[in-house]
Image (cartoon, grey):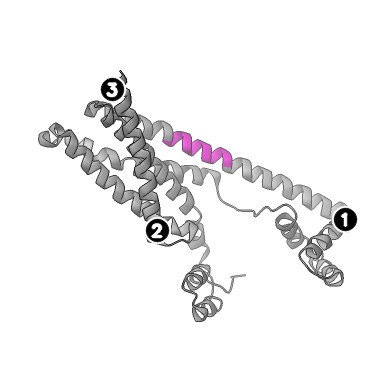
């Protein structure tokens, strides 16, 4: 059965504090399932991209600070793209898989308890609702109604008792989204150094190449930070600026470390 609410429109209404838009959002049919599926991996795409561009640019800044040549930048940069990208993708897969397995195990336990000791589960639910301020009589009435629908009963116990909100995200798709996003956005700081191999004047001017890399990286960080509003719901400008500043601090630290190491060695 389709939900009679457009969640995205409801979120927009809340941001704008627009009551009429909120009512409208609750009176229309929700987006098709494939639209919802597409939105599931936004988080992996954004955070994979953020990690990719920051770590790669930090390497570029560190190498430039150490006054090493273009080849060192490309070698270390692409090594980071492959190694860290794979590491993040595998880590995302394992963590998502472990989370799904834990959720499934807890659900199976709740189903077993509901089947073999329903009175105990009812008592737990009554106590939960009483703790939320519901009267004992009302809590018992609500639980008696819920207990007529075993699947809904277990769903509610998963959330109310265990604090688990189940998802049907694919660990494999999550990991692929993370890796591809890491590699794609992590490639941005290296673009100018690849082009420099074909442009002698750019190759000879290390400062200009680094400046262009800084600008490209800064713009991309701002865009990625702005896209975070899809997950956080915050203001796009402040979110983009925050990401730009944090990425800049990481790059500045890497540059300083590279410069210090060069001076020491």
Label placed on residue 238: 2
Cα distance, mark 2 to mark 1?
A: 49 Å
Residue 202 relative to residue 80: left or right: left
Q: Which residue is mark 3?
A: 263
User: Which residue is at the front of the view, 134 or 124?
Assistant: 134
SS under mark 3: helix
Asked if marks 2 and 1 touch (Cβ < 8 Å), the reply is no
Q: Residue at x 46, y 73 (%)?
A: 16
Q: Nearer the viewer, mark 3 or mark 1?
A: 3
Residue 93 magenta-drawn?
yes
Q: Position of residue 120 (x, y in %)?
A: 88, 55
Q: Position of residue 182 (x, y in %)?
A: 40, 42
- Asked if residue 5 shows in the view, the reply is yes
Q: Residue at x 87, y 71 (%)?
A: 137
Asked if marks 2 and 3 touch (Cβ < 8 Å), the reply is no
Q: Residue at x 73, y 50 (%)?
A: 107
Q: Which residues are magenta?
A: 85-95
Q: Earlier in the sequence, mark 2 or mark 1?
A: 1
């Amino acid at each position: 059965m389709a939900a009679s609410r457009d969640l995205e429109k409801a979120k927009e209404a809340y941001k704008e504090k627009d009551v009429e838009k909120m009512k409208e959002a609750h009176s229309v049919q929700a987006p098709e399932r494939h639209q919802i599926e597409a939105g599931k991996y936004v988080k992996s795409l954004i955070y994979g991209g953020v990690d990719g561009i920051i770590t790669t640019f930090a390497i570029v800044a560190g190498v430039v600070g150490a006054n090493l040549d273009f080849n060192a930048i490309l070698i270390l940069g692409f090594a980071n793209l492959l190694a860290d990208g794979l590491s993040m993708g595998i880590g995302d897969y394992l963590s998502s898989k472990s989370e799904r397995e834990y959720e499934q195990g807890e659900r199976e336990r709740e189903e077993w308890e509901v089947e073999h000791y329903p009175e105990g589960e009812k008592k737990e639910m009554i106590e939960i609702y009483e703790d939320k301020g519901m009267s004992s009589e009302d809590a018992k009435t609500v639980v008696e109604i819920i207990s007529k629908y075993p699947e809904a009963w277990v769903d509610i116990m998963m959330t109310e008792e265990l604090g688990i909100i189940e998802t049907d995200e694919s660990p494999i798709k999550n990991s692929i989204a993370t890796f591809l996003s890491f590699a794609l956005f992590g490639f941005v700081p290296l673009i100018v150094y690849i082009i420099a191999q074909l442009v002698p004047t750019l190759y000879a001017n290390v400062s200009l190449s680094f400046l262009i890399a800084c600008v490209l990286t800064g713009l991309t960080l701002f865009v990625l930070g702005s896209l975070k509003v899809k997950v956080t719901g915050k203001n796009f400008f402040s979110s983009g600026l925050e990401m730009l500043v944090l990425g800049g601090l990481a790059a500045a630290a890497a540059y300083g470390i590279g410069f210090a190491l060069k001076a020491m060695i």
